Image (tube, rainbow, N blue to C red):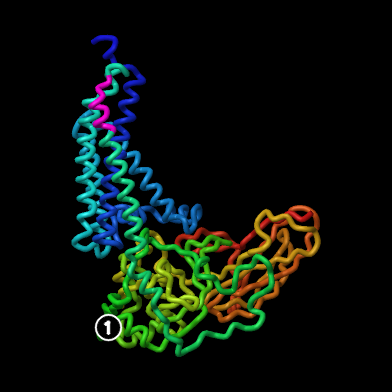
Amino acid sequence: MSTLSRPTKSTAAARTRWAAAAGIVAVGAGVALGELLAALLSPGLSPVTALGGAVIDAVPPGVKDLAVAWFGTADKAVLIASIGLVTLALAAVAGILEDRRPGTGLVLAGLAGAAGLAAVMTRAQPGQLAALAPVAGAALAMVLLRLLARRLAAWNPARSRAKETAPLARRSFLQLLGLGAAGAAVGGIVTAVIRRAGSLADSARSALALPAPATPAQAIPAGASLDVPGISSLVTPNPDFYRIDTALIVPALSPDNWTLKVSGLVERQVELSFADLLAKPMTARHITIACVSNEVGGDLIGNALWLGWPVRELLAMAGPKDGADMVLSVSSDGWTAGTPLEALTDGRDALLAVGMNGEPLPLEHGFPVRMIVPGLYGYVSATKWLTELRVTRFADDQGYWTPRGWSALGPIKTQSRIDVPRQGAKVEAGTVQFGGVAWAQHRGISRVELRVDRGPWQQAELAPGISKDTWMQWRRGLDLGPGEHEIQVRATDSAGSPQPEQRTPVAPDGATGFHTVSVIAG
């Protein structure tokens, strides 16, 4: 071997980098094609979101809790970004393998496509056309990777110095690499445009006029909203309302095609169209809902004015059979919640909600129809994009989260939160105004108290609540001398039971403990 043709560390590294780039471009083009076809053929399901859904299904409850605790409502964006980074790394490895041992990189790309296909086909209601997206994407990735590997081998930068470089081979590889990258970018842009413009659900929502409630909402009592800067709004605006679910793409359901089926242990199966539902006598109610993943002092909770038809009326039409004790509510994406039948028929304002704060449900909050059940955490009650109510038994069926380590029953626990001052705030010594919210849905709050540095409890002013199903605001001025102070809050429900002091994690049935903040007075 001549000196001029012997590979050096730098030229070998250059070839490895180009091989990795070839893998990234080839797989990127395949992913882009798969997502584009999915946007055209199965807008609610794509290979990427199907893989993300499979990851969510597979992770232990503790990992899910950490994701929500660290990232809050941005957990889905973080998951998608993580999938992207892993795909990027695997694509680079596929390119390097294909360059060094032809055929091995193709196997890796094919396995990735098979994983996407399996994920798509195991999601709820995949449809016959949904399989085309991962298959076509994998085929394009494999073909493009093979072509790029061959052109890279013809150029072979690891065995050529600048003056020996084969210009045509180099140009051919770089041109194909550039075309593949451009195609992937264009495909991604077109997919985004299609998804943004193609949502009939968004247009239908904008055109929808909600009926007036036959049973109006409760009047908000005078003084229910306290004048404390920084305290949570009595009614949470829609854009600020928390969102926790497993949907990586928000289901876009057309109300014209939507139906709700009642099945299972019933005397009569019932099927309801959206027009049928809107024709029912609607009830408007302020109801506070919360996620079971809400940590002590957390913000995965909100209060809204909901408009809907009582679930008990629909169940009465179907006639639950003796022995039934659970209703499995099913989302359009296959997610399920197991709700005690009693909680849907005992007279509480459990609703098939169509409106939120005076407007149709936002898409991300369940349009066209979702469940709202006072007193239960969302994982056992608040099904979005609702399509079926299956009357059954806890002994026979489970909701989505129960086999993943969460309790089958999810009554909301009494909690309270300090909104102001925030943790670590610097305040002037003297009387400091504290404020926040407390909740015990379907039981109500009777008292809120604070203590300074583990001293005696001091009762706060509790604003009149809208109802026992909503949170209540509170405030209290505390005398603080110079220095750092620990402030704790506790609430007592209307039955006289105080919230527990012992700290417990959110799993398996909701966190407990006193919300505690430290402030510095000076």
Q: Residue at x 30, y 46 (%)?
A: 184
Depicted 412 relative to depicted 114: above or below: below
Instruction: Check the picture and name the quadrant holding the C terminus.
Output: bottom right
Q: Is residue 54 visible?
A: no
Q: Which residues are magenta?
A: 165-174
Q: Residues within 10 Å of mark 1 (few under 14, many from 20)?
A: some
Main SS of residues in magenta: helix
- Which one is nearer the viewer's eye here, 4 or 439? 4
Q: Which residue is mark 1?
A: 270
Q: Label 1: state its secondary structure.
A: strand
Q: Residue furthest top?
A: 2
**Residue 166 located within the stretch drawn in magenta:** yes
- Counting every numbered tag in the picture gives 1
| Callout 1 amino acid | Val
Image coords of residue 408 (percent x, y) = 39, 68
410 vs 324, left or right, is right
Q: Residue at x 31, y 43 (%)?
A: 182
